[in-house]
Image (spheres, rainbow, N blue to C red):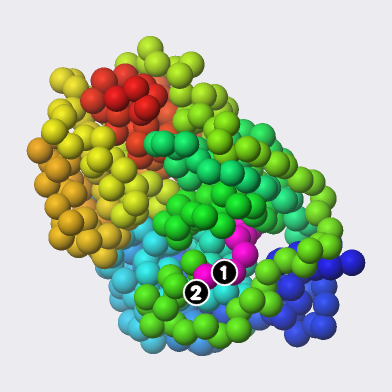
Amino acid sequence: MGKTMSEKILARAAGRDSARADDIFWVNIDKAMMDDILGPRLEIADRLKEIGPAVWDPEKVVIISDHYTPPANEKQANIVKYTREWAKENGCRHYYEFDGPCHQVMVEKGHVLPGEVIVGTDSHTCMYGALAAFGTGIGSTEMAGVLATGQTWLKVPRTVKVEWNGALGPLVMAKDVSLKSIGAMGHSGATYKTVEYCGSTIRGLPMDERLCITNMAVEAGAKAGLIGYDGITAAYLSERGIQDGGFEWVNPDADAEYCAAFTFDAAALEPQVARPHEVDNVCDIKSLEKIELQQVYIGSCTGGRMTDIEAAAGILKNRKVAKGVRLLVSPASKEVYAQCLKAGLLEVLSEAGAVILAATCGACLGVHSGVLGEGEACISTTNRNFWGRMGSKSSNVYLASPASAAASAIAGRIVDPRTI
């Protein structure tokens, strides 16, 4: 019987010739990522002092201040300050601040390679699977152990196969693919499993779109989300000065064993929306076209990349945001911000009435830069719409693609982007 991607990657990390689903191994960690909100403070710093005198390998530790940047108050500023100082004191030179959401920065800066095992103090660490790396989120106590030893134990996940074939229709994006997949699996349908995304649709997507899909695998409970290595992966790495290192071995075998399988026709896919307050509460956008909005948010590590902002700008060009609606746009990183600025996309959005924000996680989790008030409704390109996620506990967050969000900003209500 052939091997899945997880079985191959975790066998290598454990120093084993082979691995099977449900095996439990101690594995060597290739990279450890911490952000400011769940990073080297409180429990991690204290536990590390108890376990060992130093970080096992500072070159393999990446620290990114992103949730509290720019700080909205003194408490947030002190957390960022402590994170910065801790990185310096422990010799972790891979420290980034004000560069954007951690996952986007990780891939842009070349800290993610196919076949690696990467852990992070953020549940959306699974995004790295778009580059055929086994990325997964861990808690603070476990991270303290990783920092001290460079190892952790993992059970090899069983794998769910999600296959998409055919071409996506106009203004249907990766976010729609992701939401439809999660809706079918359910919010716990892939708990402690890997989701392998495959098929002609996935193979035809650029890396920007692939990153959106693997990022949200955890919304179905997944331990990891993976896409096989191919020419698009190689080209993305090459742009960052990383040459092909024989990464084809991470692809699944043709006779790999899966615990479940889902198959979808991309041509039949309609723009999707996840209704409050669960990501798997998914429906076609046309069934929600009477929902009035007070805010539209385009950004984050699932909706703020170059292709996302291009799609939004294409819809908003020579149009205006509806009266009474605030459109907030936050590029996924400082690098993406510069690309969009050079391409004139931010000017297009600003002229339409958008407010351009720094590259930050702030609005996504409701800590600054776009918090929702009582009873307000927002359509957002972020990855979660939980109760009170973006502000008031009486607010409602609808998840959708950048194209759907941009069209809804013009209409002042949720609307199918194909009607604009």
- In the rendered structure, the answer to whether residue 260 lies left or right of residue 50 reads right
Q: Which residue is mark 2?
A: 234
Name the residue at the right extreme.
1
Instruction: Estimate the x, y position of residue 404 in percent, counting from the top left.
Output: 37, 32
Residue stretch rendered in magenta on the structure:
223-231
Residue beneath the point at 47% across and 31% down: 271
Instruction: Estimate the x, y position of residue 20 in percent, counting from the top left.
Output: 84, 67
In the image shown, does 416 or 371 lie closer to the viewer? 416
Residue beneath the point at 51% across and 29% down: 270
Q: Amino acid at mark 1?
A: Asp
Q: Which residue is mark 1?
A: 230
Q: Are marks 1 and 2 in contact (CB under 8 Å)?
A: yes
Q: In the rendered view of the protein, which quadrant contains the C terminus? A: top left
Residue beneath the point at 48% across and 16% down: 287
Q: Amino acid at mark 2?
A: Ala
Numbered disc 2: secondary structure: helix
Between marks 1 and 2, how big is the CA–CA gap? 6 Å
In the image shown, does 214 or 16 lie closer to the viewer? 214
Query: Quadrant location of residue 102?
Result: bottom left
